[in-house]
Amino acid sequence: MTVFLNGDYLPLTEAKVPVMDRGFLFGDGVYEVIPVYSRRPFRIDEHLARLQKSLDGIRLANPHTVEEWRAIVARVIGSGASDDQSVYLQVTRGPMAVRNHAFPKTVTPTVFVMTEPLVTPPAEQRAAGVAAVSAADFRWLRCDLKATSLLANCLLRQMAVDAGCVETVLFRDGFLTEGAASNIFVVRGGRLLAPPKNHLMLPGITYDVVLELAKAHSLPHEVRDITAAEVAEADELWMSSSTKEVLPIVRLDDRPVGRGAAGGKPGPLFADMYAWYQDFKTRVMRAG
Ligand code: PDD
């Protein structure tokens, strides 16, 4: 596997960054994760547009044009071992001469791109659904930026792992925000609900695809604030991300999601959405 580091293509083991890099000392950087199917990046334009927004949000100039990014990503994908991959791309504010929170006068960003095999959830996990825990969202107020400073997300995800679960569903002031590393959808009474994009959640690329598919297939849907009580009474709960695609959450805090015999297992609307998602992916990839 070849990685890209500051203009060079080299083996991962040879890629080195200085310890004075602000990404290392402050988590001062932004990133993207782009899924790749059959060696083609999925929704790359949308990922690069979100990268631009994240860079604008942290006041760092984009070191590459969209065309340059596309070429870098294509070359790294070409070196990957599998056809389906997950491309990781990060830009930090680069090295500083002395440790200082304020930005250096001259910034030389560090640009790093690597690829890993894409590991989507196994079919059995999708068929059975996964368990999640809930927690107070104690992150900052710029969760719309895909920043590399992910300590809060790591602590929150670890809560799920410690409880033998897959994700932590986050609430701020009694309202659903997102997961530690995913967006969350609620189904109630045949209607899909999604929290609105704002500074409290990452505008997921998969989130957009899910809402586009709901629209295309006339599934009633609504983007609005969702209370913790509505989540507790959900018929279905889904998580979405570039690497997990769409996955049903069937237990939350040790209680089944959904009522009666239908509770605790993936619901019918999830089955529809998953089929639409796979069909969409195949069509997009075929179209090139
Ligand atoms: N995470 N919210 C958070 C906090 C995330 O970290 C992610 C994705 C998402 C979903 O966004 P998208 O659909 O664009 O992948 C939502 C990636 C996969 C990661 O950090 O590895």
Image (cartoon, grey):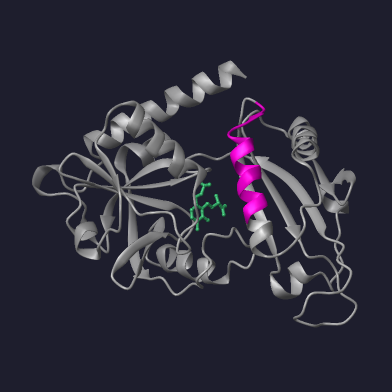
Which quarter of the figure is the N terminus placed in?
Answer: top right
Residue 52: x and y in percent read 67, 51
Residue drawn where x is 35% and y is 54% of the image: 195
> Does residue 161 sit above or below 120 in this rendering?
below
From the viewer's side, name the closer residue of 276 and 119: 276
Residue 38: x and y in percent read 62, 25
Q: Is residue 78 left or right of residue 215?
A: right
Q: Is residue 34 left or right of residue 238?
A: right
From the viewer's side, name the closer residue of 158 and 273: 273
Residue drawn where x is 82% and y is 60% of the image: 109
Q: Is residue 108 left or right of residue 227?
A: right
Which quarter of the figure is the C terminus placed in?
Answer: top right
**Does the magenta portion include 274?**
no
Residue 287: x and y in percent read 58, 16
Toward which corner of the image does residue 9 lie, by quadrant? top right
> Does residue 221 sit above or below 94 in this rendering?
above
> Does residue 205 sit above or below 71 in this rendering?
below
Toward which corner of the image does residue 102 lie, by quadrant? bottom right
Q: How many marks?
A: 0
Q: Main secondary structure of the magenta part?
A: helix
From the viewer's side, name the closer residue of 15 and 161: 15
- The magenta region covers 39-53
